[in-house]
Image (cartoon, grey):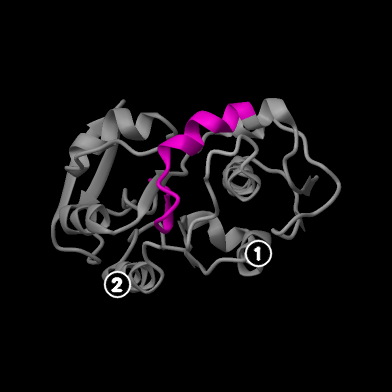
Amino acid sequence: ATIQHMTDEHAAELLRPLATQIDWGRPLVCLDVDGVLNVLDENSDAWEDWRTTEVDGWDVTVSDELARRLERLDAQRVWLTTWEHDANRHLVSFLGWQEQLPVLTSDLRAHTYDDEARSIPAVRQKLGHSWWKWWSLEAILNYADMDPHHLGVKLPPALVWVDDDLKYWPEARDWAACLPIPSLLIRPQPAHGVTPVQLTEIETFVAEHGRR
């Protein structure tokens, strides 16, 4: 499949409600859950304040400090996770966050692409069990770049993508490096999730490429 620029009007209609939820004037921070916020090894020493709850029979272990500092980011946070809307339903209150986040879902794959590249370069890649994340992020950024409904949306000043699976996706890193905006891809180790060092890197990046 070729990742290119969405021109299909029906696809744009699918993206329109999501796009209007996003503050495009701030850096876009895309968050996975498992292996990122939810540490997969409760004995990890990455943080000292782990707290665990159960969701549908599964343990979810997060750091309160990590959650607080992510919420304080002067950025537009969005979910980009297989949890999809369940992240808002089950995790937001546990994380202590005041607001739910926009969700980039697999439904965003329901689109067609034009053969002509626009300002964001196209990248070739193979589809797999988790590739919907790639399609979702590509779709929303294409939408912002094109602004098909003339809503005044535009590419954010910067992009942060945090996902433990990024180490398996060199195409995603190549794509992000070609974006006309600064990008930072963070690849936590699932056993430890986002570490203090990685979080500081995110905070510094957001502060350097902040609200326009």
User: Can you say whether 53 is above or below 117 in the image?
Assistant: above
For the question of whether residue 97 can be seen, the reply is: yes
Crowd class of label 2 (few under 14; some 14 to 19; many from 20; radius 10 Å)? few
Q: Position of residue 103 (x, y in %)?
A: 44, 36
User: Can you say whether 177 is above or below 151 in the image?
Assistant: below
Residue placed most toward the observer, 168 or 124: 124
> The C terminus appears in which quarter of the rendering?
bottom left
Q: Quadrant of residue 198?
A: bottom left
Q: Position of residue 30 (x, y in %)?
A: 44, 51
Q: Quadrant of residue 22?
A: top left
User: Can you say whether 136 is above or below 199 in the image?
Assistant: above
Q: Which mark is residue 170?
A: 1
Q: Which residues are magenta?
A: 13-33
Q: Quadrant of residue 135?
A: top right
Q: Position of residue 134 (x, y in %)?
A: 61, 48
Tag 2: residue type?
A: Thr
> The N terminus appears in which quarter of the rendering?
top right
**Mark earlier in primary sequence (1, 2):** 1
For the question of whether residue 103 can be seen, the reply is: no
Element on which disc 2 rests: helix
Residue placed most toward the observer, 58 or 22: 22
Crowd class of label 1 (few under 14; some 14 to 19; many from 20; radius 10 Å)? few
Is residue 30 in the magenta section?
yes
**Residue at the image position 75 percent from the left and 57 percent from the top:** 123
Is residue 94 in the magenta section?
no
**Residue at the image position 19 percent from the left and 35 percent from the top:** 93
Q: Position of residue 208 (x, y in %)?
A: 37, 74
Q: Which mark is residue 200?
A: 2
Inter-mark Cα distance, 1 to 2: 24 Å
Element on which disc 1 rests: helix
